[in-house]
Amino acid sequence: MPIDIDMAEIAQLFIEESMEGLDIMESGLLNLDLGDANSETMNAIFRAAHSIKGGGATFGFTEISEFAHHLETLLDEMRQGERPVTRDGVDLMLQSVDCIRDMINSLSSGEVDTTRAEELEIQLEKMLNSETCVNTAQQDISTSIGADEGRAVTTAPESGWDIRFKPHPGMLKSCNDPLRILKELEQLGEIDVCSEGGTDLILGDFDPEECLLSWRVTLNGDAVRSQIEEVFAWVTDECDFAIEPIGGDAEIQKQDLAVKSASEETPANSGKETNTKKASPPRKAVKSSTSKQEGGSIRVNIDKVDALINLVGELVITQSMLSRFNGDFDFTQIEGLREGLSQLSRNTRELQESVMAIRMLPISFAFSRFPRLVRDTGNALDKKFELRLLGESTELDKTVLEKIGDPLVHLVRNSLDHGLETPEVRLAAGKPETGVLELNAYHEGGSIVIQVIDDGAGINKDKVLQKARERGLVGPDETLSDDRINNLIFVPGFSTVDEVSDLSGRGVGMDVVRRNIADLGGDVSVQSETGIGSTFTIRLPLTLAILDGQLIRVGKQSYIISLVSIVETIQTTTDKVNAIAGKFELFKLREEYLPVLRLHELLGIEADSTRIDDGLLVVAEANGQRIGIFVDDLLEQQQVVIKSLEANYRQMQGISGATILGDGTVALILDVPGMIRLFFEQNSDAGTVSDVA
Amino acid sequence: MQSVLAVDDSASIRGLVTHVLKSAGFDVVLAEDGYEALEYARDNSVDLVLTDINMPNLDGIGLIKELRALPHYRFVPMLVLTTESGHEKKMEGKAAGATGWIVKPFDPEQLVSTISKVIS
């Protein structure tokens, strides 16, 4: 660490470190087995609280330090097995963790609000004062009384002090130098030292590591007794010493004895303690795997950076290889050129993957908040939950990760609130009383899949269908597959907050969840079985920066459609397309009628042909809605780098961005969900597809 | 230049200690816990050890005991820098072979003066 590091930077380090410590405490407290205090978890929690207290005090954040002190005391008692770990205790400590976190967060603004801390302090003290271990408390008091008595004399005598100092032979071995003590006494005033011991020393016949001398010191000046005792404080049990005022009286000597007896008592105790401590097994470190998740910067594994540097090295080699063809080129060299280009394309791909990997973070960042949330919700609803996290190390893009948090919370809350039943209901249904909520993340193709699975009551399809009919989302005589009924909960307007109470199923703001996920280029769907449970599946692109696209052509223009949203591409004939008067066209794809979106009409450009027979229909799906996009031709599939249209031009409905193609032209990337929305808005009098299909 | 082996599991305390000691002209070697310190100490000598008590893996008391068992650390001063101020804990540290005790929060000047005193 460089020497000129600013103190503010070190304090910042303390803040980051404390935040990590708080995370350790929180997850530790959540994992704490009730009644099993002497576990490694307990030690890790204690250490974190201890560090916050120590650091807080050192860096001048006294409010935090003092508050952490209370917490630490409680934790220590639990750790030592003097106090049982109770649910109330854990709750209180979790609240304290939140409180410290708030206090640390408010440090940057300069104003630390201590009202909450004071309230919690009272509660902590209350808990500390209840059924505390009596033994230790008494012991503490007796020692402190003894010490206080000894320090009773604080005034300096007129004529100075007469000090006798006889180190025990082993004093040197603990690296305590008698000379240092004499030097310290010298700082208290004028001293006169006279060596007393060593008379029976025979040269060559003693252990040079032993201290065999003793001294008598006369100290003049206005030093008080406590100052002198301070000098000897560390060596009280390694030497005999007596401090007497010159011409002192008997009373003071009695107090000297009190000091001695108090200090003699303790080494025996501490010896015992040392032995018991020794017997405990070595602790395994619970290292924090969490790194900071701040807006502007990112922590990157050094391996990833090394891989990147390595690849750049290879790229340089390829470049120099290709530069050979710069000057006189003849066709005998074509093989070499081809080889170089293929190497370049490999380098580019690997470089791209490596750069992407830097932005990748494990989903555990998003999952980490759920143990707490599940616990708190369980307490609030009087339900019992078990949370299982799977695939926590699955990596995804940092931006996606940050934005998926809220929709996930929404889904989890929804499952806890509406999906999982109360213990009574579960038992009556023959299920275990604890409901299981599982969060699972894994990679599948170019996407990441996150599932929220509960073993609750499932979606009540009858009620959902009834509601959908009331709202006019489904025709009165229409029959829908179970899957489509379940997914109705995501349809905008299906349910509003006001209707939560009369809907035992799901549906609160689910359209918002779907929209948020769609904004990330992803999709969400649900499978549910009555009485067995529900599974919400979120599918997201691994990154927002690069897209697997299908290049399509309309007239002279090229556009890109995300491959993820394309279901299939078909050629159809005019006779399979029915135009509904005043509404849009529908074509029959197997058993389903799908609307036709004529891209040239929507975008207002000229197409090669407007006849269905001449072009192709790209069947795309978004938010559970399928549509046939009429285009002139399909071109190649390729990965494209997404450039923001908003940043370079302005936001446009139905267009999610732009990219630069290999020939240098700009192609717009079509936003399929947005386009479908736009399409239905323009044909609003047609109602929804469900009505006509 | 005299060297100090500073052991603390808190990065901020390590940062502060380094800052203070380097400014005072000491050479500072850092370790995050007792084991790391012990690993270093087996093959290297320093003029003073400054250690925290509460650390994962091997705590400060354990570290001092282990170090005292090493021939080249028998006479090296070892100071404890900790929030622990209890008498019993101090005695435990002493029994292990600690030379002195500094209680956090520490005053940088006091830290330097104490170290200068015992390092002689």
Image (cartoon, coloured by chain):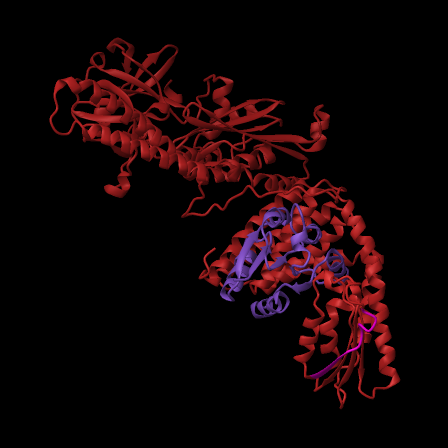
Chain colours: A red, B purple
Q: Position of residue A133 (x, y in %)?
A: 82, 55
Q: Position of residue A23 (x, y in %)?
A: 58, 46
Q: Position of residue A249 (x, y in %)?
A: 86, 86
Residue A192 is a magenta residue: yes
The answer to whether A266 is drawn above or below residue A229 in the figure is above
Splitting the image into 4 quarters, where does residue A115 fall?
Answer: bottom right
Nearer to the camera, A422 or A649: A649
Query: Would residue A594 be found to the left or right of residue A141 on screen?
Result: left
Query: Would residue A313 be found to the left or right of residue B87 on screen?
Result: left
Point out the stretch of residues depicted in magenta: A191-201
Query: Would residue A150 be found to the left or right of residue A113 on screen?
Result: right
Query: Which residue corresponds to the image point at 74% horizontal and 70% vertical from the top-left?
Result: A233
Nearer to the camera, A562 or A685: A562
Residue A371 is a magenta residue: no
Query: Which residue corresponds to the image point at 57% horizontal and 26% vertical from the top-left?
Result: A534
The answer to whether B63 is drawn above or below residue A141 in the figure is above
Furthest toward the bottom, the residue is A158
